[in-house]
Amino acid sequence: MASLAACPNRRNVPCIDDASCDLMAGGTCIPGPSERWCAYPDPSCPDGLRYSELDVGDGVSGACVEAPADAGVDAPRTPAFDVAFPKAWRFSVAGPISGYLLVINRGVTPLSMTSLNLVSITDDHPTAFARVTASPSKESISPGLAGGALSGLSQNILVDTGLVTETRTATTADYLSLEISNFPQGTYDIHVELKLELDGLTFTMPMTVHVVPAPTILADPLVGTRVTVFR
């Protein structure tokens, strides 16, 4: 008190960091209404901290530090639709092949397929390259149904395995075609990633193509996967 009385013009000094708050252990530099001020542990405060009574302005001197206002919790995302497709292929010819994408409507309103669009396609081979054509459909998929045409081999790995159990509709709508061009002879893998857009949502379809030598003619899906796209 004597030292304070000797300094009648003492001014409040905002802190810079926690190291500035060394009046007692656990000092923390806390944002106040307009400046940062030192606060120290006090179990009687709801947030466990109280602003110092020394060098603290903004009208918070000696007050408990209030917890920041709750900004709210983001609403949980809801499934919009699923896509089921082969994630592994075996190719010995260029193709193209089609009938390998199913879209399952997880929403509560019909899903229009008119907005289906290929955004980008990438692969990791220096000379071979994958080509994909997206074909929007005028048909909509009702809630709880799966839409899309399937080849026999795609039927085997996407439906017969139980990966897609929903009733199918729009079974003549062929959404995508795939071909691999300019690939050299040999045995190697090409990793392909498609980025597509549907109903304002983007999603990716990663696939691995196992290239094998001719003369056996192969353009076969091997393993299926199912991915959920959230809104």
Image: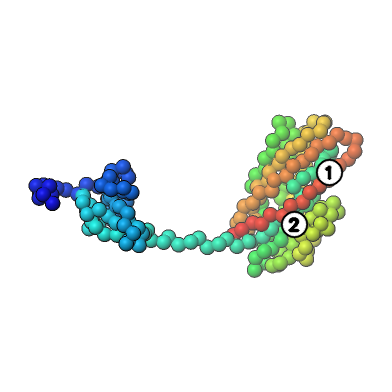
User: Crowding near pointer 1: few (<14 within 10 Å), some, many (20+)?
Assistant: many
Among numbered discs 1 and 2, the one appearing first in the sequence: 2
Q: Which image quarter holds the C terminus?
A: bottom right
Judge from the rendering whether residue 110 lies leftward or rightward of residue 29; answer left or right: right
Judge from the rendering whether residue 154 lies leftward or rightward of residue 17; answer left or right: right
- Three-letter amino acid code at the position of disc 2: Leu
Q: Which residue is mark 1?
A: 219
Q: Which residue is mark 2?
A: 102
Q: Is residue 148 above or below residue 119?
A: below
Q: Secondary structure at mark 2?
A: strand
Residue 141 image label: none
Seen at 34% across and 59% down, the residue is 43
**What color scheme is it?**
rainbow
Give the spatial CA distance, label 1 vs label 2.
18 Å
Seen at 76% across and 60% down, the residue is 164
Seen at 29% across and 56% down, the residue is 50
Seen at 81% across and 47% down, the residue is 222
Question: In this view of the protein, can residue 66 be seen by the observer?
Answer: no
The location of residue 152, given as percent across then percent down, is: 86, 54
Q: Secondary structure at mark 1?
A: strand
The location of residue 14, given as percent across then percent down, is: 25, 47
The location of residue 167, given as percent across then percent down, is: 78, 66
Q: Is residue 185 above or below residue 85?
A: above
- Three-letter amino acid code at the position of disc 1: Ala
Given residues 26 and 172, the one toward you in this image is 26
Given residues 48 and 86, the one toward you in this image is 48
Judge from the rendering whether residue 26 lies leftward or rightward of residue 150; answer left or right: left
